[in-house]
Image (cartoon, rainbow, N blue to C red):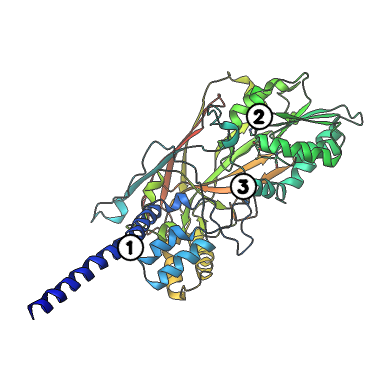
Amino acid sequence: MNRLRILVSSLFTLLVVTSVAVVNCFFFPIRQKQRNRLVSVVNAVKLSANTVIDKDNNNDDGANNKINTDCFSITANSSSNRRRNFLTQTVASTTAAILSSSVVSSLPLPVLSVEEGTPVEEKVIEFGASWSAVDGLNQMNDSNAQNKVVGFDMNAYKAMRDDTTRTPLFETAIKKRLELSGQDNNQIVIDLGTGPFALFAIIAARYGAKKVYAIEANAVAAKSARESVKKAGYDNVIEIVDGYSTQVELQEKVDFMIAEIIGSIASEEGVYATIKDAQRFLKDPTNPNNWIPNRIQTFGAPASYTLHNLFGPPEFDWTRLNGEPVRFSCRDNGLQLLSDPQLIEDISFFLLGKSHTNTTNIEEQSLSFTVNKERIEQNMKPLFDELQKAKGNDKQFSEKMAQETAHSFTGIAMWPRLFLNDDIVIDSRFYPTGGHQKSHWQTVLPIMSGRPIANLVGGELIKIKSKFELPGDVTKAPQYSIQGELKYT
Ligand SMILES: C[S@@+](CC[C@H](N)C(=O)[O-])C[C@H]1O[C@@H](n2cnc3c(N)ncnc32)[C@H](O)[C@@H]1O
């Protein structure tokens, strides 16, 4: 009997030990994996770089359509069924080309705090964001810069080429500029940042330029540009010049320059420093006709944003973005404007030669916006439609979420405007309303508080101070800061 008891007890111990070993073997790595994935959830916004949307051919910006469901499905695991569908579907169907690159921002976002019991009419809520441009020439001092700088991939270049709101207007402007000089075919041109298709260089050659210098910093793009030029049969007219314009010398001065190096915040690709330096290439840099574009602007307006309302703590911590903006297709209805847009940035290329080289240009602006009641009401429907496109959202839920989003403020949305000459202007959103439209440029939205500023009814005053620091030195990144307050009426 005793032996039998010992045998049973030994078998039991063996079973327990084996089970623990099995559990450890199989489940620990999974738990480890889960933990890693959970960490990635916290970073989901950043990790989902280039995450967008294609159901409406909405990816005008050439962002990768793959949906980083990994980041969001983990969050979904801890949520209800509806929310899970909502998270995966909504991420697929609304926003979110979010910058993947490292956050270089200095200041953390303010976490929203309003004292309980404060009467609504006295409430003033502060918000703000500061960030550093991640495109452009700011990594020139990196030894491996040729591979890293100006993060366009082939999809992005194709989106620019195929942007019907941009490329045909450039073509007309180039043709008109060449016509200005008569029939002599004597024009010498630079296409600064020609890209892999040497797009504008070939257009200039086709319309009769005598010589085109096509400068390109990205070595891979420059190689493709050379092939594109050969294929188009213009290798006797177009010379591809490898390298940064700031490090290039040409044997002759040129008549005019095409430079499409404009960011979604117009200055964020380092255009200020590049164009300041590029004055030296032109015979007459003070003539607006010698620049295409000759003036660039950034417009901005307070905006509501679905995902900011939808995702919140504990699963989702927007403050982890540290001010780095979220980027949208200009047709994305997940973002709606609360007021009429205003001018935030304005740079005229033909005036840049007058200031000293290498000095940082600091543009400071104080602007006031009043939240527009009609806009709030009009925004509800597109927000609702957007939410309804996500499978699994019942009508009631979409209505509630659209209602909440429409009455909330997330940050100041921004987008560019380009003047190609006196007559031809490119708008990436409708001018002057800021309405949605097709464009490969994105709408940039820094999230300006941990949670949306809620319960807006119209009439609230939003005051901002923007500070855009544009170094004259191409190796330094532009710095952006917008601080402000919202006052309930
Ligand atoms: C926005 S893409 C435009 C490409 C093409 N021109 C088009 O419009 O489709 C800008 C290009 O300019 C290049 N670039 C930007 N700054 C430059 C600089 N200072 N010197 C040379 N290339 C530059 C980038 O590598 C990139 O290929």
- Taking depth in this image into account, of 244 and 296 the one nearest to the observer is 244
Q: Amino acid at mark 1?
A: Phe
Give the left or right position of residue 476, taking residue 401 as reference. right
Give the left or right position of residue 147, taking residue 36 as reference. right
Residue, disc 3: 441
- Taking depth in this image into account, of 278 and 363 the one nearest to the observer is 278
Q: Residues within 10 Å of mark 1 (few under 14, many from 20)?
A: few
Give the left or right position of residue 434, taking residue 481 as reference. right
Residue 280 placement (x, y as % from top left): 69, 20
Image region (quadrant) for ligand 1: top right
Numbered circle sitting on residue 27? 1
Q: Residue furthest left?
A: 2
Q: Amino acid at mark 2?
A: Phe
Residue 122 placement (x, y as % from top left): 30, 50
Mark 2 vs mark 3, foreground winner is 3
Which quarter of the picture shows residue 220?
top right
Q: Amino acid at mark 3?
A: Trp
Residue, disc 2: 349
